[in-house]
Image: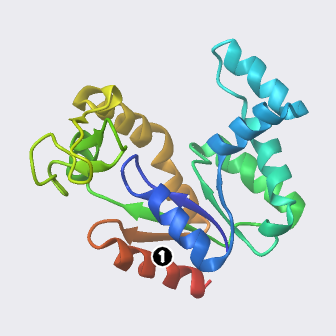
């Protein structure tokens, strides 16, 4: 299965990607991870990416596409892969399609984890992290037994600086403006499969897995 996982921040892409990668024995490919690995390894593309990041600029689509091309040539990706975090806009989707066509590995399907805006806000603004052990809670959806105290180790819970309502609202606005148009893009290719991203995590995994099984 060659696929892209689409969804807004807080939709559960990362969680589902990890589970599905293990279930189907295909790699979950995160562009953020690819960039960090390339910079650390000092590859040619990694050096170009580091130059851009050191200058405070965005890493160009050409570099990211190059990293993805290299990653897809590895043995573990020959039977399929899950792209997580790319593409983020129409231009990147077109560049990805062109590169995959050259490789003879076009996307077989695109899965959208669809979560209502109100729940995304709850998931993201309600997140609390333990200062000691790193355990994560949500004051709306999975609260600790004692307010502001970790169930596991008793450590103090805190809200990350980027989990405030204004910052999260801005992230979701960027998603709506840049990434949401990909829904129509992949619908026109008859590749989009929208899955409700709410409710039991295992049920969501099963629903996405059913899409993988039937493509």
Above or below — where is 141 with respect to 190? above
Q: Position of residue 20 (x, y in %)?
A: 55, 72
Question: Which residue shows up at 63% across the image and 14% down it?
Answer: 56
> Does residue 117 appear anywhere in the picture?
no
Comparing 121 with 104, the one in front is 121
Question: Which residue shows up at 44% across the image and 75% down it?
Answer: 205
Tell me: 123 left or right of 103.
left
Q: Residues within 10 Å of mark 1 (few under 14, many from 20)?
A: many
Tell me: 118 left or right of 92.
left
Is disc 1 placed on a helix, strand or loop? helix
User: Hey, which quadrant is residue 195 in on the image?
Assistant: bottom left
Residue assigned mark 1: 208
Comparing 192 with 135, the one in front is 135
Q: Position of residue 16 (x, y in %)?
A: 47, 65
The figure's colour scheme reads: rainbow
Question: Residue furthest toward the left?
Answer: 146
Tell me: 121 left or right of 8.
left
Tell me: 183 left or right of 109.
left
Q: Position of residue 28 (x, y in %)?
A: 63, 61
Above or below — where is 126 with respect to 114? above
Question: Residue furthest toward the front?
Answer: 153
Comparing 155 with 205, the one in front is 155
- Give the position of the C terminus as an image quadrant: bottom right
Comparing 169 with 193, the one in front is 169
């Amino acid at each position: 299965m060659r696929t892209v996982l689409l969804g807004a921040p807080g939709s559960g892409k990362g969680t589902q990607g990890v589970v599905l990668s293990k279930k189907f024995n295909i790699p979950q490919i995160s562009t953020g991870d690819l960039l960090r690995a390339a910079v650390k390894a000092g590859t040619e593309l990694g050096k170009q990416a580091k130059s851009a990041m050191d200058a405070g600029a965005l890493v160009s689509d050409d570099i990211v596409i190059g990293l993805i091309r290299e990653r897809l040539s590895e043995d573990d990706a020959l039977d399929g892969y899950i792209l997580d975090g790319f593409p983020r806009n129409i231009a990147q989707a077109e560049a990805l399609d062109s590169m995959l066509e050259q490789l003879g590995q076009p996307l077989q399907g695109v899965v959208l984890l669809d979560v209502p805006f109100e729940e995304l806000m709850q998931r993201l603004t309600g997140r609390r992290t333990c200062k000691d052990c790193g355990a994560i809670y949500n004051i709306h959806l999975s609260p600790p037994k004692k307010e502001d105290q970790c169930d596991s180790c008793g450590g103090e819970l805190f809200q990350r600086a980027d989990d405030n309502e204004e910052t999260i609202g801005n992230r979701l606005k960027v998603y709506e403006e840049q990434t949401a148009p990909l829904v129509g893009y992949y619908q026109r290719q008859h590749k989009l499969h929208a899955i409700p991203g709410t409710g039991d995590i295992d049920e969501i995994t099963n629903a996405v897995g059913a899409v993988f099984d039937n493509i």
